[in-house]
Image (spheres, helix red, strand yellow):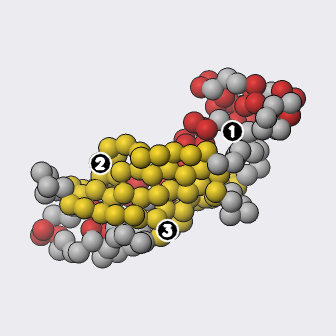
Amino acid sequence: MPKLHWEDFAAGQVAEYGPQTVTAEDIKAFAAEFDPQPMHLDEEAARQSLVGGLCASGWHTCAIMMRIVADGFILDSSSMGATGCEEIKWLAPVRPGDRLRVRMEVLATRASASRPDMGFVNARLDLLNADGARVMTLTPHLMFGRRPPAAGAGEPGARAPAP
C-alpha cells in the first residue's frame, strides 16, 4: 500500500529528492535517440554553439527530473498522474558531471469535487545543480488518491513527503 496520499500534502511544504549525476555519455545517448542537435551530441560543435559546451537536451533534463521525483516519492504514493503543467523553464544548461536534485514546494491542494477518492496538488519543482543554482523549473498539477475513510483520513498536510 502506498505511503503518501493526498492528505499528506499541504501548501508551503518543501522537500528535496535526489541527487543524480549526469554524464556526457547519458547526454549523448539521449540526444542520439530523441534530440539530435549538435550541442547535445558533439563536444566541438557544442563549444562553438551559444551554450559553449556539451549540454543535456531540455527534454532530457525533464526526464532526469521525472526519475528523481519518481524515486523520491511518486513510486511510493497514490499518484494518479497529472493534468498537465502550467509552465516549464530551462534556466541554465545541464553539463556533464552535474549532480542534480529536485526541490518540491507544494503551492496548493484541493479535494476533487467530482471524485471523493482523489485530490489535486499544485507544486513547483526546481531542478538544482550542486551549487544550488536552478537549472529548470516546472509547475505540475498532480493527482493523488485519498486515504479510504477507514484508514483514518486526516487533514491535508498530516504527513510531509519524506526527502
Identified by mark 1, the residue type is Ala
Residue on which the image places disc 3: 15
Q: What element carries label 1?
A: loop
The foreground one among 90 and 100 is: 90
Q: What element carries label 3?
A: strand
Residue 95, position as x, y percentages in the image? 75, 45
Residue on which the image places disc 2: 80
Within 10 Å of disc 2 (Cα), the crowding (few <14, some 14-19, many 20+) is some
Q: Is mark 2 on a helix, strand or loop?
A: strand
Counting residues from the start of the chain, the first of labels 3 and 2 encountered is 3
Residue 152, position as x, y percentages in the image? 17, 74
Quadrant occupied by the N terminus:
bottom left
Q: Which residue is drawn at 27% across and 71% down?
A: 156
In the shown orientation, is residue 159 left or right of residue 119? right
Label 1 with label 2: CB-CB less than 8 Å: no
C-alpha span from label 1 to label 2? 29 Å
